[in-house]
Image (tube, rainbow, N blue to C red):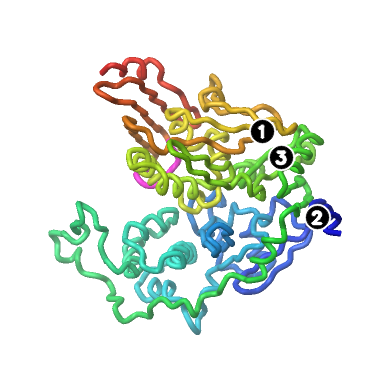
Amino acid sequence: MKITYTFQKKSMKCTTIHFNVNGKYIHADHVDPETTLAHYLRNELGLTGTKLACEEGACGACTVTIGKWDRTLNRAIYVAVNACLYPLYMAHHRLVLTVEGIGNVKRLHPVQERIARGHGTQCGFCSPGFVMSAYTLLRNNPTPSIREINQAIKGNLCRCTGYRPIIEALQSFSPSGCCRGSGGKCPCKEQSNGLDREKLVTFDDFPKLGESQEIVFPSKFIMESEDSDGEEIFLEGRRVMLQAPSDLKVFGEHLRSNSEAKIISSGLITKLIASQSSFDKKVVWVSTHRLKTLCDVKVFDKEMSVGANLTISEFLDAVSRHCKSNISKPIRKLFDKYSSLQVANVASWAGGFFSGSSDLSALFLALNPSLTIRNAASVHEYRHVSELVDENGRAKLGKSQFAISMSFPRSEDGLRLFTFKQGARSGPDSTDVNCVAALNVKDVIETARVAMSLGSRAILCGKLSKMLCGK
């Protein structure tokens, strides 16, 4: 009986997306795979507080909070995402929180109240995005530093340029009230002009954060996430058919049955390109996002194995936790100017690398880690990054091949890592030029790998790398 039940479970296809919005359970039947969370919230649920502006994940006006259950930590974690790009099907068994759900006109959430009463709104179009970015940070960490607050809202733009009152309102949640820069001193308060030190509003008497007013993660989804192993999301729309199995063997079967299928992870880039394109025939997307074996992090003595489904935020967290500072600090510096936290919370490192448009390209080419590659026939092979980058500077895989994991260095004596990024603006932006240099130094430079990204092209600077050796 047990064997029969397991077989039925693994063959089960799910055509209904089950999720919770602001405490209310939603069941969306036969949705189009191209439907974004923002369009569903606005058009089907009438939650128009989630704004649509650029629809490219560049301005943050559509920011919402996604809560998902982490089996390893045995608790819910919350991330800010761009709802304009976030596929609705990825909200399956997740909690979605919008600006309407965390507070209302009768009882504002402390974040909403401080921005409103602190003169943080002008036209108000960007306000929901700022609110939800700050809310997500505070939901995970109620006592953030000034730097953490600034990082949380770096993907949000105010087109009225009214940043000062917004930032002052949000920084009031930091107990330090200080950036802790310059060796622990407070340069943010060392202003020669007295007017610069005067706050627009004093927030001392404003309501504090309280967990009792927050919407808790639905216990129903904790149990359903445990029971959904073997379940496959199957959706068919006007232009796209989506298959998202949770079993690696079933995933391979889909690739064998359709050699033209497009392999996606989060699907952010694929969705963005598809929205601007026309199709001659219906295309098939096979998504890896439900394959839990691609989410593992395994730590060894000199390296760690990171699954291909890890988001860029999760990858950077693993680097910070498990790599020595000579590796982790330069990488964090490079990604301080990454597109936005909302994008990093959804896009996978594998998808970003193989798209060729990520800051990861130069980093991986310089460090040259080994990737585990699998094909539709379940055959594994191990390839270094340098073997995957073609003459045009783009990482390529064979048809029906996909990445399983990457062996990334975490402890290497003598390694000096240098990173540099220049975008069109000083803040988070797409890359114009990236440069990463990985040098192995004892008395002199013994080996060197210098890589650059120029737009979407990554190149290894062979002559420069060779010239540095012995210096």
Comes first in the chain, label 2 or label 1: 2
The C terminus sits in image quarter = top left
Mark 2, residue position: 6
Circle 2 — which element? helix
Residue hosting label 1? 374
Where is residue 323? Give x, y as percent. 40, 42
Q: Nearer the viewer, residue 122 or 72?
A: 72
In the image: residue 164, left or right of residue 376? left
Q: What's under tag 3, amino acid-wise?
A: Ser
Viewed as shown, does residue 295 lie left or right of 199?
Answer: right
Q: Is residue 99 above or below residue 379?
A: below
Within 10 Å of disc 2 (Cα), the crowding (few <14, some 14-19, many 20+) is few
Q: State how far apart marks 3 and 2 are (Cα).
A: 41 Å
Callout 1: SS:
strand
In front: mark 1 or mark 3? 1
Magenta range: 425-431
Query: Is residue 33 visible in this depiction of the protein?
Result: yes
In the rendered image, which residue does mark 3 sit on?
Answer: 278
Residue at x-position 39% and y-position 39%: 423
Q: Are marks 2 and 1 in contact (CB under 8 Å)?
A: no
Q: Counting residues from the N terminus, which is met first, the one under dot 3 or under dot 2?
A: 2
* Image: 353 above or below 394: below
Q: Secondary structure at mark 3?
A: loop
In this view, the residue in front, 48 or 231, is 231
What's the residue type where badge 1 is placed?
Answer: Arg
First along the sequence among labels 1 and 3: 3
Q: Depth check: 325 or 257 in front?
A: 325
**Quadrant of residue 259 within the rendered picture:** top right
Task: Give the Cα separation between the discs numbered 1 and 3.
Answer: 30 Å
Which quarter of the image is occupied by the N terminus? bottom right
Type of residue at label 2? Thr
